[in-house]
């Protein structure tokens, strides 16, 4: 079957109307491409198709810490103890020093970034364990953690001026 070409009806020509052609841009100009959002309907947006990435808790859990080799757990405990030492020194007469220090940190850490340093230490240690194949017998120096606090972000409760008085 051979389709016949039909000429336009009298009084006009066929004109294709499409999207206008974008003129070329000069070099160095950045363009932004927008993505369609929703299904195009007048109602609310459709629910998210992909699951959002689950956030890890700010402080490592006991199950996470248990995954570290024995001496790496000891190094992590020492690092955490050094981080809370200024609080422990401020309240040296307490019976439950570690518990009091933990409560004091949670009260003093009005900025979540203060607690994020514990997670950062744990993540760094876990990465080194995997990369280097550390075992329970591998000695771990505290130097693997780097500086205790970033120079520009030392929490108020960890500053040198927070020394016990007396």
Image (tube, rainbow, N blue to C red):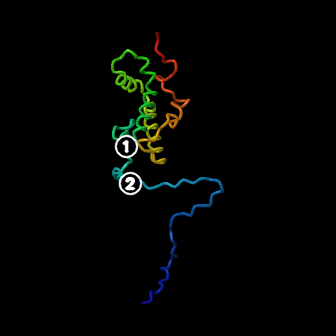
Please say if 75 is above or below 18.
above
Q: Which of marks 1 and 2 is nearer the N terminus?
A: 2
Classify residue 17 as left or right of residue 96: right
Q: Give the SS element for disc 2.
A: loop
Foreground pick, 159 / 86: 86
* Residue at 48% across, 18% down: 162
Quadrant containing the N terminus is: bottom left
Foreground pick, 38 / 108: 108
- Image location (x, y in percent) of residue 67: 37, 43
Please say if 125 is above or below 18.
above
Looking at the image, the residue that sits furthest to the right is 27
- Image location (x, y in percent) of residue 155: 48, 26
Residue identified by numbered label 1: 67
Foreground label between 1 and 2: 1
Foreground pick, 83 / 72: 72
* Residue at 54% across, 53% down: 32
Work out how far the residue at label 1 is from the one at label 2, CA to CA, in angstroms.
Answer: 42 Å
* Residue density around tag 1, few if under 14, some if 14–19, many if 20 or more, within 10 Å: few
* Residue at 50% across, 22% down: 159
- How many numbered discs, if any? 2
- Image location (x, y in percent) of residue 132: 48, 47
Q: Do the residues labelled 1 and 2 touch (CB within 8 Å)?
A: no
* Residue at 47% across, 41% down: 124
Residue identified by numbered label 2: 38
- Image location (x, y in percent) of residue 101: 38, 23
Looking at the image, the residue that sits furthest to the bottom is 1
Foreground pick, 129 / 146: 129
């Amino acid at each position: 079957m051979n389709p016949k070409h039909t000429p336009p009806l009298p009084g006009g020509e066929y004109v294709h109307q499409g999207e206008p052609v974008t003129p070329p841009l000069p070099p160095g100009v950045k363009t932004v491409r927008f993505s369609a959002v929703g299904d195009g309907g007048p109602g609310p947006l459709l629910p998210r198709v992909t699951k959002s990435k689950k956030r890890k808790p700010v402080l490592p859990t006991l199950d996470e810490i248990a995954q570290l080799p024995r001496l790496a757990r000891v190094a992590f405990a020492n690092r955490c103890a050094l981080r809370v030492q200024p609080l422990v020194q401020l309240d040296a007469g307490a019976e439950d020093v570690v518990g009091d220090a933990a409560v004091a940190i949670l009260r003093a850490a009005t900025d979540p970034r203060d607690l994020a340093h514990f997670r950062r230490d744990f993540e760094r240690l876990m990465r080194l364990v995997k990369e280097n194949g550390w075992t329970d017998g591998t000695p771990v120096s505290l130097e693997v953690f780097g500086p205790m606090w970033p120079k520009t972000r030392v929490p108020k409760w960890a500053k040198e001026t927070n020394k016990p008085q007396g």
